[in-house]
Amino acid sequence: MYPIKLSLKHQSWLVAATCMVADGGFVLLNRCAPWQTAVVLTMTLAVNALLAGPARSAGWVAALQAAVPLIVLVLVGDRMHSNEAGLLIAGYRAGAWLRGVEAWSSLAVVAASAFVCPYAMGTDVVRSLLVVAKIAILPFLVGRYTTARRAYLAELEKRSAMEQADAQAAVTKAITEERSAIARDLHDVIVHHVSAIGLHAGAARLSLPGGDTKLAGSLRSVETSSRAAMVDLRHLLDLLHGDNSEGARQPGLDNLDELFDGVRAAGTPARLEVRGQKRDVPDSLDITVYRIIQEMLTNALRHGDASGVTVTLQYEPDSLTITAANGTGSGNGHNGSVRRGLVGIRNRAGMFAGTTQSGLEPDGRTWRTAVTFPLEVS
């Protein structure tokens, strides 16, 4: 706001200075006695300098501008120009900045001066009235029009802003309602089924004979996975309900140990290697990398052999690469479920300009998936 006010002040001084130069030039070009020229020039420059004053003084400035031609008429007669430009600007200011009695009083004073001077010099009434229209009424009306137009545009901008705000509120409301509906469906259907899986797995494990440790371990892994799924589902439900608190935060790279522990509990060896200088990544990418590693581990659990899976995080100055390598056992690494998992990984990577490569290694037994994300140079 301060630079705008400063700019307006400079422009008002520029207007006043232009009036002083124009009117002062005409005064100097008049062939009058030096003392008359000095008096008229002083009055003209003084009242025109007042045009740079604040809006609240517009009425007094208009009255002083109207008085100058009358004083010149008394001192010099009809042989001298004085402050015609100043009168025009004063009339405009009165129309633009004043309201009520003060505005109409200023117009009346300027109109009276514009009528009396030519009429006293012998001009007929009609021509004197035309001078009033040109010197007093026209600038006043232009000032009125400018202010009204500015107010109209401001009202249009305000109305447009309100309409945009209403539209945004409507979109936000629709999104919130849709998210709430999705959250209800998740809670009523998915959460119920996942919870039932965990309960049934626990009941089955407790009813097993004491010697069947392998089956008990598998059921315990089902319980662990169902509990982890419940945690993730509740995080998603919190996010859908608009809860962005720390408790609703989605898992990221800091939660990889828990993820790998779950895979190991399911009986699959899982190893994590971190190479390079570890660095912070944006929260959204942090979550995406976690989900990609989760999908890699899921693919290894479903389709890998007993050798397990190795996940490598390679930090470079300008990139982050996630690589997963696991044995394929019978070499069934190209089935449909793997392809669907790779499509999900590729889609997640594409959101951050990441590139994905996957396929069997030359030995024909190792499936390798690599995702590289570009990072800003640290």
Image (cartoon, grey):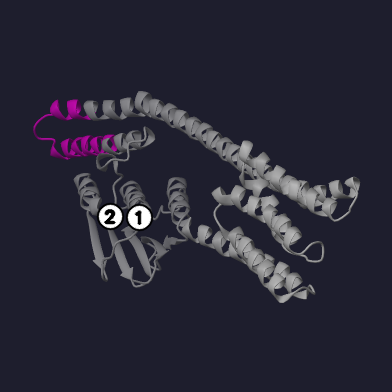
Dot 1 falls on a residue whose secondary structure is helix
| The label number, if any, that marks residue 253 in the structure image | 2
Residue 358 falls in image quadrant: bottom left
Q: How crowded is mark 2: few (under 14 residues within 10 Å), some or many (20 or more)?
A: some
Which residue lies at the image location 43% right of the left edge and 45% below the top edge? 337
Left or right: 65 in relation to 247: right
Q: Mark 1 points at which residue?
A: 289
Which numbered disc flags the more N-terminal residue, 1 or 2? 2
Q: Kindly identify the residue that appears in the image at 22 percent across and 26 percent down.
A: 199
Secondary structure category for the residue under label 2: helix
Per the rendered image, the range of residues in magenta is: 201-230
Label at residue 19: none
Image coordinates of residue 207 in percent, x first then y, are: 14, 25
- 350 to 302, vertically: above or below: below
Q: Are marks 1 and 2 in contact (CB under 8 Å)?
A: yes
Q: Is residue 271 left or right of residue 348?
A: left
Q: In this view, does 28 lie above or below 85?
A: below
Residue 250 location, quadrant: top left
Amino acid type at mark 2: Leu
Between 332 and 275, which is closer to the camera in this rendering? 275
Kindly indicate the quadrant of the structure image that contains residue 145: top right
Say whether residue 199 is magenta.
Answer: no
Three-letter amino acid code of the residue under disc 1: Val
Q: Residue furthest left?
A: 210
Please name the residue shown 30% across and 63% down the image: 313
Q: Position of residue 26 (x, y in %)?
A: 76, 70
From the image, which quarter does the C terminus lie in? bottom left
The answer to whether one can see residue 280 in this image is: yes
Q: Dot 1: few (<14), some (14–19), or many (≥20) neighbours within 10 Å?
A: many
Residue 218 screen position, x and y as percent: 21, 39
Q: Main secondary structure of the magenta part?
A: helix
